[in-house]
Image (tube, rainbow, N blue to C red):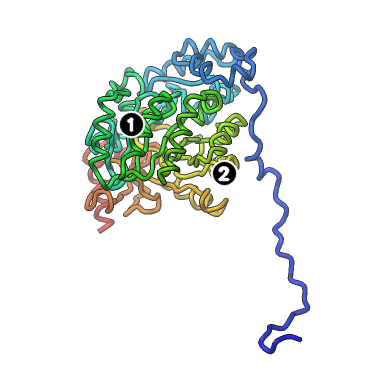
Amino acid sequence: MLASNALPIIDQALPPALKPAVDPSSLTHRDLLEGPFWQSIPAYREVDEATFLDHKWQAKKTITRPDKLLKALQELASDEFIKDVEAGFQRAPMAVRISPYLLSLIDWKDPGNDPLRIQFLPMGSRFLPDHPKLGLDSLGEQADAPTAGLTHRYRDKALFLAIDTCPVYCRFCTRSYAVGMNTNEVEKVSLKANSGRWDQAFEYIASRPELEDIVISGGDSFNLRADWVREIGTRLLNMSNIRRIRFASKGLAVMPQKVLTDDAWFSALIDIHQLGRQLGKEVCFHTHFNHANEITEISRRAIQRLFSEGITVRNQSVLIRGVNDTVESMSQLVKRLSYINVHPYYVYIHDLVKGGEDMRTTLQTALNLEKHIRGLTAGFNTPTFVVDAPGGGGKRSAHSYESYDRETGVSRWQAPSVKPGHDFFYFDPIDQLSEEQQARWLDPHEQQKMLDELRDISR
């Protein structure tokens, strides 16, 4: 017998709440490139898997000159394309460095439009004039550096640029002022690995009790020797004020072989992670995939090795025109990252970078993408779209602008917890504006007027 306060049982079947069957094409993020795909490149036709997975072989065969590129590609690339790339090398602010693994992932039937080629191999014919508001250190990292290579912008976090080299060099690098060798366009600030410079950074970090979070970057932490990984990690974790450290690296996207075959480096990273656990502190790895085509079965194996040791891996992408600026391409990237246990963390709206104007998008592009991506997957696997405010405002949610004039392409930002009372401006690429607005940007007086107009709108 039912209790007097029990709800009556309704003898009626509930209507079905099943979603319709999914289109199989929506699951292609699980289809990872595998097999000896590198053998499609003539120079690697006889290379077996063991050799291709050797990080030393990858580093030794990394291409840094147009003539070596031509030799590697042989009949795959046209003379016209090679000449275009040679012209691009002459204008690029970054030295060229591209691994055999990365070279093997480019679609050589249409290299001009390939999303990986766009990121790493400049074509002279694709360059656009730099934005007139561009500065070489557009984020003002050096202005916020109490010691060389240490940027202290946020109250409890600092960025430690331990090294100035990377396994590959990205065309869109925001640190083209320091990373890599000098080029025809840029004489670099020296941030080489140096114990004296490191000691100054460590002394400053230890002297600031508010600092709790250190990002170890460069350059690329992939290029730190195993003993350097141990030294940096141990010194930071043993500071009473430090609670979190993050190793930042593009390496997983461009040379995952290092995680699989450089046991000394991997062991050093794991030892630091375990030391952090013993001390009740967090050690994470932040990486940088920009397109789903960068994620292969080799990537998954490298991530799995980190995952099996309990290391959290987060991804920070850059929004790049022709690479991941469509709903389809960004959705595939986010889903594929999630599938291999990498958390999509940030998508940066492309910084103002010398020689990179053809790769930038509008802020509105980011806003549109964020609207479609949210709800695609779980919240912790949904990236935040951010603008790193030029001039040192730090990362701001793409939706948090004070005002945005889509006609002039100027957006105004404030960062009350970073630099209160300051205005920061981001600028859409000029070639994406109307002819009338493009003409205004040719006039320095009009340039200032556009900024003043935006301030007036905000008031």
- Name the amino acid type tagged 1: Leu
Image position, residue 296 (x, y; %): 60, 31
Element marked by disc 2: helix
Q: Is residue 424 above or below residue 216?
A: below
Q: Which residue is mark 2?
A: 338
Q: Residue at x 61, y 20 (%)?
A: 38
Q: Residue furthest bottom?
A: 4
Q: Residue at x 51, y 31 (%)?
A: 253
Asked whether, in this view, residue 140 is left or right of residue 44, the answer is left
Pick whichever, 287 or 311, lies toward us: 311
Image position, residue 196 (x, y; %): 25, 25
Pick whichever, 31 or 435, lies toward us: 31
Q: CA distance from mark 2 to mark 1?
A: 28 Å
Q: Quadrant of the N terminus?
A: bottom right
Element marked by disc 1: strand
Q: Which residue is mark 1?
A: 161
Q: Is residue 128 above or below residue 9?
A: above
